[in-house]
Image: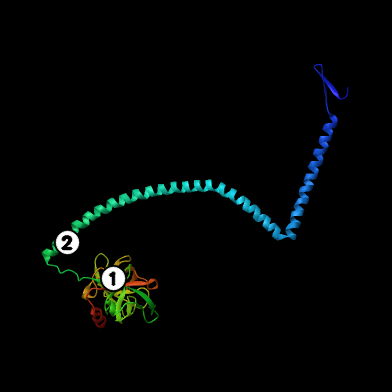
Amino acid sequence: MPDAERYGGTIVKQPTGQISRLGTVKYLVQRFAFLSLIGLTFALMLIGKADTILVERARMAVSDAVTPILRVMAEPAAVISQFVTNLHELAAIREQNADLREANTLLLEWQAVAQTLESENSQLRGLLGTVNDPETRSVTARVVADYGGAFAQSVLITAGSRNGVAKGQAVTTAEGLAGRITQAGYRSSRVLLITDINSRIPVSVGEAGGRAILSGDNSSRPKLNYLGAKSAAAPGDRVVTSGDAGAFLPGLPVGRVVSVDEKNVVVEPFVSRGRLQYVEVLDFGLTGILAEIDRAD
């Protein structure tokens, strides 16, 4: 019996013809599937070359069908990402909160010290009969023209006599002193910057408070004249208005000493002409004094 075998007395037939036919079909399917894929690829390429609009529409149809699925899949990832971001922000907020609490405690301590000093200062002024500084009025104006050049360092602002601006008033920014009013029209005024060759500002230098005159020379860095001794100034010293001759109130920031040699003490102003956009005109009730200083210089 060629087509059967005996197992424990039982005869089992093997369908050898059927197995052979299945193997042949499987071989043909595998062979022709590869060829079919190659043919389909070439067909799609030809269709894409022949009808690009059709391919583009098919591509967009597939994209439209897949987009909702991708959106659903992306939402959990976005939620997880936002959750992680919130955790990082929460940790940062806690750290900032701790820093702010510490800073607030320190500020409260300084507030108590400042209130004590203010009370003592008020009492001492009363005992000495000190005359209080004049009340300061201010006007904010925009810089609309820059007349800077080789022979002039001045700007035009949009405030004039109708706004209370007058010749001699100080012009400042948030950084410090920019210059002073030299001409006041009805709607506009001209500001002479501290770097102009005609500018002379009485100043105080460093912690020692050495008196000097800040003189412009049309460069970006004016110089200190009439300083008692060059050794009285050192790089890094802060320069502020001294209030001498009643030109300005004392203490307005002007600049910082950047170099000292045998001939010159050079100052870097806090205010840069290139960054002037808005200025504040201060009225201390002390006008016309600087003009006398300029004539006497």
Comparing 57 with 296, the one in front is 57
Q: Secondary structure at mark 2?
A: helix
Residue name at image x 74 percent, y 56 percent? 45
Quarter where residue 263 is shown: bottom left
Q: Give neighbour class at mark 1: few <14, some 14-19, many 20+ (Cα, 10 Å).
A: some
Task: Give left or right: position of 228 versus 52.
Answer: left
Residue that carries the numbered disc 2 in the rendered image:
121
The residue pinned by badge 1 equals 230
Residue 48 disc label = none
Quadrant the C terminus occupies: bottom left
- Residue at 37% across / 50% down in the picture? 96
* Three-letter residue code for mark 1: Lys
Screen quadrant of the N terminus:
top right
Residues tagged 2 and 1 counted as in contact (Cβ below 8 A): no
The relative height of residue 34 versus residue 23 in the rendered view (above or below) is below
Residue at 22% from the left image edge and 73% from the top image edge:
244
- Rendered image quadrant of residue 217: bottom left
Q: Position of residue 211 (x, y in %)?
A: 24, 71
Label 1 SS: helix
Seen from the viewer's position, the closer of residues 90 and 214 is: 90
Residue 163 pos. (x, y %): 28, 77
Q: Is residue 233 above or below residue 291?
A: above
Residue 91: x and y in percent read 41, 47
Q: Is residue 62 rendered to the left or right of residue 203?
A: right
Measure the C-alpha gap from mark 2 to mark 1: 34 Å
Query: Of the residues tagged 2 and 1, which is closer to the observer?
Result: 2
